[in-house]
Image: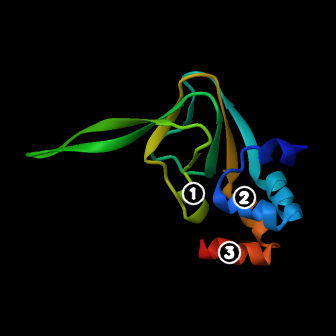
Amino acid sequence: LHYELCSLHLRHPLLRWWAAFDDSGVQAFAQESLEFQALAPADNLFIPRERATGAYLHVSGKLNYYRMQENVEEEGEGPVVPSCQEVVDGACFCEMALWLDWTHVGELTAMSGSEVLLVNVEGMAKVLQNQHVVRQLVVQY
C-alpha cells in the first residue's frame, strides 16, 4: 500500500526507470526510503546550514524556497539577502543530498498546508546495497 501511494509521485526519471526495470526493487526502495511529511502554513522543512537528510518530491500545497545570498557591496560584504522561488507542483528538490554530504543554503517554507515526499538518503543507500544493476546506474547518473 505504501508503494502504491508513493508511486503516484515518482516523477524523477531515475525513479521512473527503476520502477519500470525492477518493480520489487523499487517497492523495497519505497518501504525503506520514502516518507510523507505534512507541513502547516509557515512551517520550515529545512533551514540554512542544516545538514540535509535526503531529497524531496513536492506532493501538494504552496512552498517557497528562500536561498540566502550575500549582497556584496563595494566596501566589503553586505547583508544576507534572501531570494524567493516558488516550488512547482511535482518538483524534485534538494537532489544533491542523494549524491553527496549536503548542507542547505536556504530555507523552505510552507505558504499553505503542504505535503512532500522525503527520499531518505540512508534508506536509499541501504536498498542499493542489494540492487547491483540499479546501483551501477545510480553511480553513472
Question: On screen, 110 above or below 89?
Answer: above
Q: Residue at x 72, y 58 (%)?
A: 16
Task: Tell me the tag on residue 16.
Answer: 2
Give the foreground label among 2 and 1.
Answer: 2
Amino acid carrying label 3: it is: Leu
Q: Residue at x 72, y 74 (%)?
A: 135
Amino acid carrying label 1: it is: Ala
Extreme residue toward the left, this view = 75
Read off the residue under disc 3. 137
Distance, label 2 to label 3, CA atoms, is: 13 Å
Q: Residue at x 29, y 39 (%)?
A: 80
Amino acid carrying label 2: it is: Arg
Q: Label 2's element?
A: helix
Read off the residue under disc 1. 97
Lower position in the chain sequence, tag 1 or tag 3 = 1
- Within 10 Å of the Cα at label 2, are there few (<14), some (14-19), or many (20+) other Cα atoms? some
Q: Residue at x 72, y 44 (%)?
A: 9
Question: On screen, 26 above or below 106?
Answer: below
Give the foreground label among 2 and 3.
Answer: 2
Query: How far across and down, in percent of the image, does residue 7 sit?
Result: 79, 48
Left or right of 104, for residue 1: right
- Within 10 Å of the Cα at label 1, are there few (<14), some (14-19), or many (20+) other Cα atoms? many
